[in-house]
Image: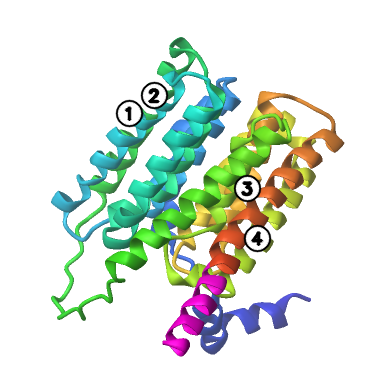
Amino acid sequence: MYYPYVRLLSNRKMLSIINKYVQWSWAEALRGALCMLPSIVLCLLGKPVYGLEIGICSIPLAMVGIQPERQDRLRLLFAVVMLSIVFGLGVVLPGVWWMDMISVFLVVYATVPLAVFTRIGLLAYLILLPSFVVAVSNHSSADSGLPISLLLFSSGVWIVIVNYLFPEKKEKKRKKASPRVPEIPKIHRLGLLFACAIVGTMYIGYYLEIKDPAWAAIAATLIIRPHDEMLKFRGIVRVMATTGGILLAFSMMPSAENNCVLGIYLFGIAVIIIAMRKIQWYLFPAGMALLLVLLYNKQEPSDFITVLNFGLIRNTIGSMVALYFGLCIPWMIGRVLAEFRKNN
């Protein structure tokens, strides 16, 4: 009965087509599984909130990949240390809304140039910025923030150890074409636009008196990126990916009440994202949005409608503000500059 399907899948041409569009890597899947072990253990030990928080922060660290030489893999320790420090600083900041917005604005504006020029800077944009926004919004005491910072540091060190133990790869040295670096004024403009987008999202949340307004800002960070691609179709696709992840989370919520099942979900989502990290299917924003909804449901168990409102309202606010600052304002600036050049 199943023979025709087995024969079809065993065809080399069919396998090459599947590999082209899926690009599944078993080595990356194994590495992702090992990197997520601390998060899974925390879920199984009855600490699902800590497990989800550590897992959400561990996925971007694992997505960086491994360098061919072991010495270069130790550079990830810098991001691990900065992650723990930034999260701790965000927790202990005073809970004044305008101070929160100023601190987030400065962090975003300083992170965007790093993300444009360096790979470690892009990692900082993907993980340090969302973790800082979450920490600022929570305003937990130092007693509750310190354990999370220590867990983040320990999990990051574990990821570095896993990467270091993988065998070295011998790569042929190729002459790389010099990357096209954006002009300095353009980089500052990107930093200003993206900082205004994230801070503007937080301000709307504070103005509307939405609980945990930083979650809307995190939705904006999942959508907006410090590159020209945000000015194109991909920004809209990210909105669709995050919305799809939120809707998928609702189907998992009833079974995710069990910590073992939640650990399986976290493990499977992380392994899929890491093993298929080289494709442009936007699994990262979809998976992160899914895990964030599950985290909120664990932090404050609520009914289906409450969680639905939490996810969709905050995602809608973050998406609209991100698209406004990432698409509309640059388009208007371009039109004004074009008219100015035409008249002069």
Count residues near mark 2 (Cα–Cα under 10 Å), then give few for <14, some for 14-19, many for 20+: many
The foreground one among 186 and 57 is 186
Q: Earlier in the sequence, mark 1 or mark 3?
A: 1
Mark 4 and 3 residues: CB-CB less than 8 Å, in contact?
no
Q: Which residues are magenta?
A: 330-344
Using the numbered discs, state the Cα–Cα distance from disc 4 to disc 1 in whole angstroms.
30 Å
- Residue ID at (51%, 86%): 12
Mark 2 and 1 residues: CB-CB less than 8 Å, in contact?
yes
Magenta-drawn stretch contains 337 = yes
The foreground one among 295 and 39 is 295
Using the numbered discs, state the Cα–Cα distance from disc 1 to disc 3 in whole angstroms.
24 Å
Residue type marked 2: Gly
Front position among marks 2 and 3: 2
Q: In the orientation shown, which residue stands out farthest toward the front?
A: 344
Q: For mark 2, what is the residue?
A: 88
Using the numbered discs, state the Cα–Cα distance from disc 4 to disc 3 in whole angstroms.
10 Å
Mark number displayed over residue 85? 1
Using the numbered discs, state the Cα–Cα distance from disc 2 to disc 1 in whole angstroms.
5 Å
Residue 19 in sight in this render: no
The foreground one among 340 and 195 is 340
Is 93 placed above or below 141 here?
A: below
Is 99 placed above or below 225 here?
A: above
Mark number displayed over residue 289? 3
Q: For mark 4, what is the residue?
A: 239
Q: Earlier in the sequence, mark 4 or mark 1?
A: 1
